[in-house]
Protein backbone atom coordinates (compact mmCIF):
# COMPACT_ATOMS: atom_id res chain seq x y z
CA UNK A 1 0.00 0.00 0.00
CA UNK A 2 1.38 3.39 -0.95
CA UNK A 3 2.20 5.67 1.96
CA UNK A 4 0.67 9.16 1.90
CA UNK A 5 3.20 11.83 1.10
CA UNK A 6 4.15 14.23 3.93
CA UNK A 7 1.68 17.10 4.15
CA UNK A 8 -1.03 15.32 2.14
CA UNK A 9 -4.47 16.64 3.00
CA UNK A 10 -3.11 19.83 4.60
CA UNK A 11 -3.68 23.37 3.40
CA UNK A 12 -0.99 26.04 3.60
CA UNK A 13 -1.40 28.29 6.61
CA UNK A 14 -2.38 31.34 4.57
CA UNK A 15 -5.21 29.44 2.88
CA UNK A 16 -6.54 28.22 6.22
CA UNK A 17 -6.56 31.79 7.57
CA UNK A 18 -8.33 33.07 4.46
CA UNK A 19 -10.96 30.34 4.72
CA UNK A 20 -11.83 31.28 8.32
CA UNK A 21 -11.86 34.97 7.40
CA UNK A 22 -14.43 34.23 4.68
CA UNK A 23 -16.79 32.24 6.91
CA UNK A 24 -16.43 34.34 10.08
CA UNK A 25 -19.82 36.06 9.80
CA UNK A 26 -21.72 32.76 9.45
CA UNK A 27 -19.45 30.58 11.61
CA UNK A 28 -21.68 30.62 14.71
CA UNK A 29 -24.77 29.79 12.68
CA UNK A 30 -22.93 26.93 10.95
CA UNK A 31 -21.93 25.50 14.33
CA UNK A 32 -25.51 25.60 15.61
CA UNK A 33 -26.93 23.98 12.49
CA UNK A 34 -24.28 21.27 12.03
CA UNK A 35 -24.42 20.20 15.70
CA UNK A 36 -28.17 20.67 16.15
CA UNK A 37 -27.41 23.14 18.93
CA UNK A 38 -25.17 20.75 20.89
CA UNK A 39 -22.06 22.94 20.42
CA UNK A 40 -23.12 25.19 23.32
CA UNK A 41 -23.32 22.19 25.67
CA UNK A 42 -19.92 20.94 24.47
CA UNK A 43 -18.32 24.30 25.26
CA UNK A 44 -19.86 24.41 28.73
CA UNK A 45 -18.58 20.88 29.36
CA UNK A 46 -15.09 21.85 28.13
CA UNK A 47 -15.09 24.89 30.43
CA UNK A 48 -16.11 22.68 33.37
CA UNK A 49 -13.31 20.20 32.61
CA UNK A 50 -10.77 23.06 32.62
CA UNK A 51 -11.21 23.10 36.42
CA UNK A 52 -10.80 26.87 36.71
CA UNK A 53 -12.43 29.25 39.14
CA UNK A 54 -12.60 32.86 40.30
CA UNK A 55 -9.28 34.63 39.78
CA UNK A 56 -7.85 32.10 37.31
CA UNK A 57 -5.86 33.18 34.23
CA UNK A 58 -6.77 31.31 31.04
CA UNK A 59 -5.51 31.30 27.45
CA UNK A 60 -7.95 30.08 24.79
CA UNK A 61 -5.84 29.21 21.75
CA UNK A 62 -7.66 29.25 18.37
CA UNK A 63 -10.52 31.07 20.06
CA UNK A 64 -12.39 31.68 16.79
CA UNK A 65 -15.51 33.76 17.44
CA UNK A 66 -14.89 33.53 21.16
CA UNK A 67 -17.77 31.46 22.54
CA UNK A 68 -15.51 29.15 24.55
CA UNK A 69 -13.59 32.15 25.90
CA UNK A 70 -16.92 33.62 27.05
CA UNK A 71 -17.77 30.40 28.88
CA UNK A 72 -14.34 30.47 30.54
CA UNK A 73 -14.78 34.13 31.48
CA UNK A 74 -18.00 33.32 33.32
CA UNK A 75 -16.04 30.93 35.52
CA UNK A 76 -13.02 33.12 36.31
CA UNK A 77 -15.18 36.16 37.11
CA UNK A 78 -14.08 39.80 37.33
CA UNK A 79 -10.93 38.94 39.31
CA UNK A 80 -9.67 36.51 36.64
CA UNK A 81 -8.33 37.00 33.14
CA UNK A 82 -9.13 35.32 29.84
CA UNK A 83 -7.05 35.82 26.69
CA UNK A 84 -8.59 34.70 23.39
CA UNK A 85 -6.01 34.17 20.63
CA UNK A 86 -6.68 33.46 16.96
CA UNK A 87 -4.87 34.02 13.67
CA UNK A 88 -8.03 35.04 11.77
CA UNK A 89 -8.71 38.79 12.12
CA UNK A 90 -12.28 38.41 10.86
CA UNK A 91 -13.09 35.72 13.45
CA UNK A 92 -11.67 37.99 16.15
CA UNK A 93 -13.76 40.89 14.86
CA UNK A 94 -16.87 38.80 15.58
CA UNK A 95 -15.50 37.83 19.02
CA UNK A 96 -14.76 41.45 19.97
CA UNK A 97 -18.37 42.42 19.32
CA UNK A 98 -19.46 39.87 21.94
CA UNK A 99 -17.40 41.13 24.89
CA UNK A 100 -14.82 43.74 25.81
CA UNK A 101 -14.02 41.96 29.08
CA UNK A 102 -11.77 39.46 27.30
CA UNK A 103 -8.28 40.24 26.00
CA UNK A 104 -8.67 39.37 22.31
CA UNK A 105 -5.35 38.98 20.50
CA UNK A 106 -4.38 38.14 16.96
CA UNK A 107 -1.62 35.55 16.88
CA UNK A 108 -0.52 32.08 15.86
CA UNK A 109 -0.62 29.06 18.15
CA UNK A 110 2.93 28.16 17.01
CA UNK A 111 4.22 31.67 17.66
CA UNK A 112 2.57 32.87 20.87
CA UNK A 113 3.18 36.57 21.69
CA UNK A 114 3.62 36.19 25.44
CA UNK A 115 5.72 37.50 28.32
CA UNK A 116 8.96 35.50 28.38
CA UNK A 117 10.33 37.71 25.58
CA UNK A 118 9.79 40.77 27.77
CA UNK A 119 11.73 39.15 30.61
CA UNK A 120 14.76 38.47 28.43
CA UNK A 121 14.55 41.95 26.92
CA UNK A 122 14.66 43.35 30.47
CA UNK A 123 17.66 41.12 31.22
CA UNK A 124 19.50 42.41 28.14
CA UNK A 125 18.79 45.99 29.24
CA UNK A 126 20.24 45.24 32.69
CA UNK A 127 23.53 44.07 31.15
CA UNK A 128 24.08 47.20 29.09
CA UNK A 129 26.52 49.78 30.49
CA UNK A 130 27.82 47.48 33.21
CA UNK A 131 31.25 46.08 33.94
CA UNK A 132 31.58 42.27 33.67
CA UNK A 133 31.37 41.99 37.47
CA UNK A 134 28.28 44.22 37.70
CA UNK A 135 26.59 42.36 34.83
CA UNK A 136 27.16 38.97 36.46
CA UNK A 137 25.77 40.24 39.76
CA UNK A 138 22.70 41.65 37.95
CA UNK A 139 21.95 38.22 36.45
CA UNK A 140 22.55 36.18 39.61
CA UNK A 141 20.56 38.52 41.86
CA UNK A 142 17.33 38.47 39.83
CA UNK A 143 14.52 37.42 42.23
CA UNK A 144 13.35 34.44 40.18
CA UNK A 145 16.92 33.09 40.02
CA UNK A 146 17.52 33.59 43.74
CA UNK A 147 14.34 31.60 44.47
CA UNK A 148 15.53 28.84 42.13
CA UNK A 149 18.97 28.74 43.80
CA UNK A 150 17.29 28.13 47.15
CA UNK A 151 15.60 25.04 45.66
CA UNK A 152 18.57 23.84 43.61
CA UNK A 153 21.82 25.37 45.00
CA UNK A 154 24.00 23.71 42.37
CA UNK A 155 22.51 25.97 39.68
CA UNK A 156 24.16 29.03 41.21
CA UNK A 157 27.67 27.89 40.27
CA UNK A 158 26.44 26.70 36.88
CA UNK A 159 24.86 30.09 36.13
CA UNK A 160 27.96 31.86 37.39
CA UNK A 161 29.99 29.92 34.83
CA UNK A 162 27.45 30.36 32.01
CA UNK A 163 26.88 34.11 32.51
CA UNK A 164 30.45 35.22 33.23
CA UNK A 165 31.36 37.28 30.17
CA UNK A 166 34.02 39.89 29.37
CA UNK A 167 31.72 41.90 27.09
CA UNK A 168 28.26 42.49 28.65
CA UNK A 169 27.21 44.75 25.76
CA UNK A 170 27.89 41.95 23.27
CA UNK A 171 26.02 39.49 25.48
CA UNK A 172 23.01 41.83 25.55
CA UNK A 173 23.02 41.99 21.74
CA UNK A 174 23.24 38.19 21.54
CA UNK A 175 20.22 37.81 23.86
CA UNK A 176 18.18 40.15 21.68
CA UNK A 177 19.14 38.20 18.56
CA UNK A 178 18.02 34.93 20.17
CA UNK A 179 14.60 36.24 21.24
CA UNK A 180 13.88 38.23 18.08
CA UNK A 181 10.71 37.03 16.42
CA UNK A 182 11.29 35.70 12.91
CA UNK A 183 7.91 34.34 11.84
CA UNK A 184 7.73 31.83 8.99
CA UNK A 185 5.00 32.96 6.60
CA UNK A 186 4.23 29.41 5.49
CA UNK A 187 5.35 26.65 7.85
CA UNK A 188 4.60 24.05 5.20
CA UNK A 189 7.66 25.45 3.37
CA UNK A 190 9.76 23.80 6.09
CA UNK A 191 9.03 20.49 4.39
CA UNK A 192 11.38 21.61 1.63
CA UNK A 193 14.34 21.80 4.08
CA UNK A 194 16.47 18.82 3.15
CA UNK A 195 19.60 19.62 5.18
CA UNK A 196 19.98 17.63 8.43
CA UNK A 197 18.72 19.54 11.49
CA UNK A 198 19.26 18.54 15.12
CA UNK A 199 16.49 19.76 17.45
CA UNK A 200 17.26 19.74 21.19
CA UNK A 201 14.29 20.54 23.45
CA UNK A 202 13.31 20.47 27.11
CA UNK A 203 9.84 19.68 28.43
CA UNK A 204 8.32 22.84 29.89
CA UNK A 205 11.13 25.11 28.68
CA UNK A 206 9.88 28.50 27.44
CA UNK A 207 12.63 29.12 24.89
CA UNK A 208 13.07 25.59 23.52
CA UNK A 209 9.64 24.03 24.16
CA UNK A 210 9.29 20.35 23.39
CA UNK A 211 5.89 20.97 21.78
CA UNK A 212 7.47 23.24 19.20
CA UNK A 213 10.25 20.72 18.65
CA UNK A 214 7.70 18.03 17.79
CA UNK A 215 6.02 20.38 15.29
CA UNK A 216 9.32 21.19 13.59
CA UNK A 217 10.36 17.54 13.59
CA UNK A 218 7.15 16.58 11.82
CA UNK A 219 7.58 19.34 9.23
CA UNK A 220 11.31 18.93 8.49
CA UNK A 221 12.00 15.56 6.84
CA UNK A 222 15.72 15.40 7.67
CA UNK A 223 15.42 16.51 11.30
CA UNK A 224 16.44 14.58 14.40
CA UNK A 225 14.66 15.36 17.68
CA UNK A 226 16.14 15.00 21.16
CA UNK A 227 13.82 15.82 24.08
CA UNK A 228 14.83 15.96 27.74
CA UNK A 229 12.25 15.92 30.56
CA UNK A 230 13.99 18.74 32.48
CA UNK A 231 17.05 20.99 32.60
CA UNK A 232 18.54 18.66 35.17
CA UNK A 233 18.21 15.72 32.76
CA UNK A 234 19.88 17.72 29.99
CA UNK A 235 22.80 18.68 32.26
CA UNK A 236 23.20 15.08 33.38
CA UNK A 237 23.32 13.99 29.73
CA UNK A 238 25.73 16.72 28.56
CA UNK A 239 28.68 14.39 27.85
CA UNK A 240 26.46 12.15 25.74
CA UNK A 241 24.81 15.16 24.07
CA UNK A 242 28.14 16.78 23.21
CA UNK A 243 29.27 13.52 21.62
CA UNK A 244 26.01 13.26 19.72
CA UNK A 245 26.25 16.86 18.45
CA UNK A 246 29.85 16.15 17.37
CA UNK A 247 28.73 13.12 15.35
CA UNK A 248 25.91 15.14 13.85
CA UNK A 249 28.23 17.96 12.75
CA UNK A 250 30.66 15.52 11.21
CA UNK A 251 27.84 13.95 9.23
Image: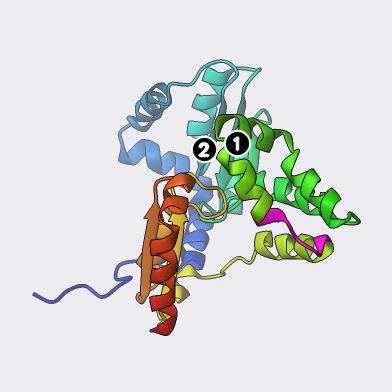
Instruction: Report which residue position mark 1 lands on.
Output: 83
- Residue at 52% x, 18% y is 75
Q: Is residue 169 visible?
A: yes
Q: Residue at x 89, y 54 (%)?
A: 130
Q: Is 159 displayed left or right of 212 in the figure?
A: right
Quadrant of the rendered structure where residue 216 is? bottom left
Q: Quadrant of residue 251?
A: bottom left
Q: Secondary structure at mark 1?
A: strand
Farthest residue toward the left?
1
Range of residues picked out in magenta: 162-168
Q: Label 1 crowding class (10 Å Cα cut-off): few <14, some 14-19, many 20+?
A: some
- x 69%, y 62%: residue: 180
Q: State whether residue 190 is above or below residue 64.
A: below
Question: Where does residue 70 sit, x and y in percent of width and height?
Answer: 54, 28
* Circle 2 residue: 60
Asked if residue 222 is among those painted magenta in the image, a careful observer would answer no
**In the figure, 203 relative to 15: above or below?**
above
- x and y, in percent, of residue 178 in the image: 66, 63
Residue 63, compared with residue 187, is above or below; it is above
Whether 44 is drawn above or below 238: the answer is above
Indicate which disc, 1 or 2, sits on the residue closer to the N terminus. 2
Q: Relative to 56, is 221 on the left or the right?
A: left
Q: How many marks?
A: 2
Task: Compare residues 145 and 131 and report the one nearer the observer.
Answer: 131
Asked whether residue 114 appears in the rendered view, the answer is: no
Q: Secondary structure at mark 2?
A: strand
Amino acid sequence: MARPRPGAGRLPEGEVRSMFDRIARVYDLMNRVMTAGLDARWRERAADLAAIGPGSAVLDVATGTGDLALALARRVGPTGRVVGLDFSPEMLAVARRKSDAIDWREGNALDLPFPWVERYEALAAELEGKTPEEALEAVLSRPERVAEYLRTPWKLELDRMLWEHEHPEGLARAIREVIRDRPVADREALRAVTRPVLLVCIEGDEIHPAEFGHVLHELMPASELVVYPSQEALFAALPELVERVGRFLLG
